[in-house]
Image (tube, rainbow, N blue to C red):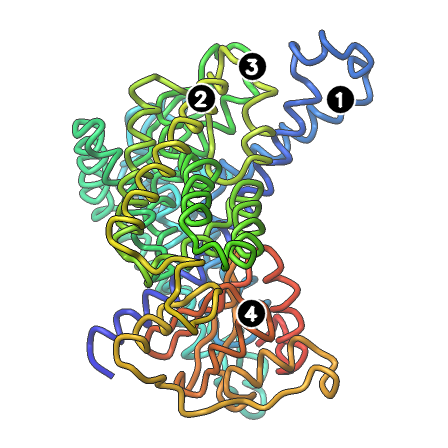
Amino acid sequence: MNKGSNIMDVMQRFSKAMFIPVLILPIAGLLIAIGNILTNANLLAVFPFLDNPITVGFGTIISGSLVTILQNLGLIFCVGIAVGLADKKKGEAGFTAMLAFLVFINAMNKFMTLKEMLADPENLRGTGQAMVLGVQVLDMGVFAGILLGIIIAVIFNRFADIEFNNAFNIYGGTRFAFIVLIPVVVIFAILMTYIWPFFQQGINSLGGWIQNAGNFGIFVYGALERLLIPTGLHHLVYTPFLYTSLGGTEIINDVVYEGSRNIYYAEMVEPAIRQLSASVIWDARGISKMFGLIGACLAMYVTADPDKKQKARAILIPAAFTSFIAGVTEPIEFSFMFIAPVLYVVHAALSGLSMVVLNVFNVRSIGPNGFIDFLMMNVPLGIEKTGWPMYILIGLVFFVIYFVIFRVLIQLMNLKTIGREDEGAETRLYSKKDYLDKKSGAYASEYTAATSESNTGSIGMTVVDLLGGKENIESVTNCYSRLRTVLKNPDLVDQEALKNETQASGVVVKDNNVQVVYGVQVGSIRKSVDQVLGFSSEE
């Protein structure tokens, strides 16, 4: 395997680990939104029955308690990444990470105290310092958790299996890994005391460049986030903007919040704030998901061959519905991503352009996923605070733009989208491997798994067999819509059967990393696969 492949493997593994903390945060956000609904003054005026001590009190508790998560993202990312990158004993890895994080912040605080580097704790604004779990340290934000999580995972994987004999046995295993971590974490804390201010300056400069780039910076951000979908690394683009100073910094009730999503969560429960901050634009990526891709689906349907329209409709309607409601776009994007890549480039450009238009019209709505999230996170806050009707209006405009451009390009370039396949070809969704196979004229798969659902009685058994069997699977994880696996031999994957027998929307193969797109049901499929493989959270 070449150097580039090794780098991609590392990036893929890191991206999988990032999903552990990243995917839990939207849940907290939705619960905060529910709390805000129950305490929203405008809503209580319309529905007086909600204005009672029980529902208002419950909403206040929900909102106030979950906002605390946003103030401790360093710890959350530290534990989440350590668990994600641990090869085994993941529960103990998470516990070790929590202990190491406590050692880190206190070691940094003590060293800064000795060096008389601590600022006035009553006036930390602009000092580059912050209170973390009640300890005053440099304000590294989520980066502290990311860096520590990686360090902890490397040390844990290296030393967690070392055992000792006789009286020293108690110090073996994961306890020995923690013993090794203590001096490493202390040294890291001391080094960061000197190094981090330079990184912070660089981060601020990057954020400043994007802000100064104005609409061009927003366009690049939106387009790049879509272009990286095939690699599975797209969330690495937007995560720093959502949870670090790259996405903006605001002071709300004397508390500093960094990142677009964090600022939004804090502002949504603050009635004194009449309009959300402009930083919300970094989390307004849903125009293409809720409206644009629906127009693309309509264009593919109306341009389908007459005798294939019924099959095309059966494929496109569920895919469009999933994208609109839940923001899961892979089923649609895989339908043209590799068969007609020019459409995907146009899609990425339009996605970036939609964010620019939102910014030009000063729309302050959050819209990262589908319509359910959009309604929950915007409508209760009111029109003045979010401008959500304008978001929908712009979305409808882009629905038309997508439809017109896709229809023209499909007909002008005779693109083989769903329903326009060559004679004898099957009307279905496609994957990257299909595209490569079509260009080479032959399928590269050297193995065809023979499975029977009646014999196995399990979707998990079918998936495992079609991935080359138990012995071929090294690890299994999942994100919001994809089953992510690392295989010993990816050539053993039967992509056709995965799509036909397990209803996968697509398959992405990159070296030993194989991702199978299932959409919102991926969680249950992952659980079934784990049962077949005998995997558990500790493995």
Residue designated by label 2 = 393
Q: Amino acid at mark 1?
A: Gly
Which circle's residue, 1 or 4, is located before the other in the chain? 1
Report the mark closest to the observer, 1 or 3: 3
> Is 56 situated left or right of 412 in this image?
right
Q: Split into 4 quadrants, where in the image is the N terminus? A: bottom left
Indicate the position of residue 86 as horizontal and vertical percent values.
48, 71
Q: Amino acid at mark 4?
A: Lys
Rounded to the nearest angstrom, the CA distance separating label 1 from label 3 is: 21 Å
Q: Is residue 99 visible?
A: no
Residue designated by label 3 = 382
Which circle's residue, 1 or 3, is located before the other in the chain? 1
Rounded to the nearest angstrom, the CA distance separating label 1 from label 4 is: 37 Å
Which circle's residue, 4 or 3, is located before the other in the chain? 4
Q: Amino acid at mark 2?
A: Leu
Work out whether 388 lies above or below 203.
above
- Contact check, label 1 and label 4, Cβ < 8 Å: no
Residue drawn at x 58%, y 92% as measured from the top left: 166
- Please tell me which residue lies in front, 67 or 55: 55
Which circle's residue, 4 or 2, is located before the other in the chain? 4
Residue drawn at x 17%, y 33% as measured from the top left: 209
Work out whether 506 lies above or below 204.
below
Residue designated by label 4 = 90
Which circle's residue, 1 or 2, is located before the other in the chain? 1
Work out whether 483 lies above or below 398.
below
Residue drawn at x 68%, y 31% as measured from the top left: 62
Rounded to the nearest angstrom, the CA distance separating label 4 from label 3 is: 43 Å
- Give the crowd class for mark 3: few <14, some 14-19, many >=20 residues within 10 Å: some
Residue drawn at x 64%, y 77% as measured from the top left: 460
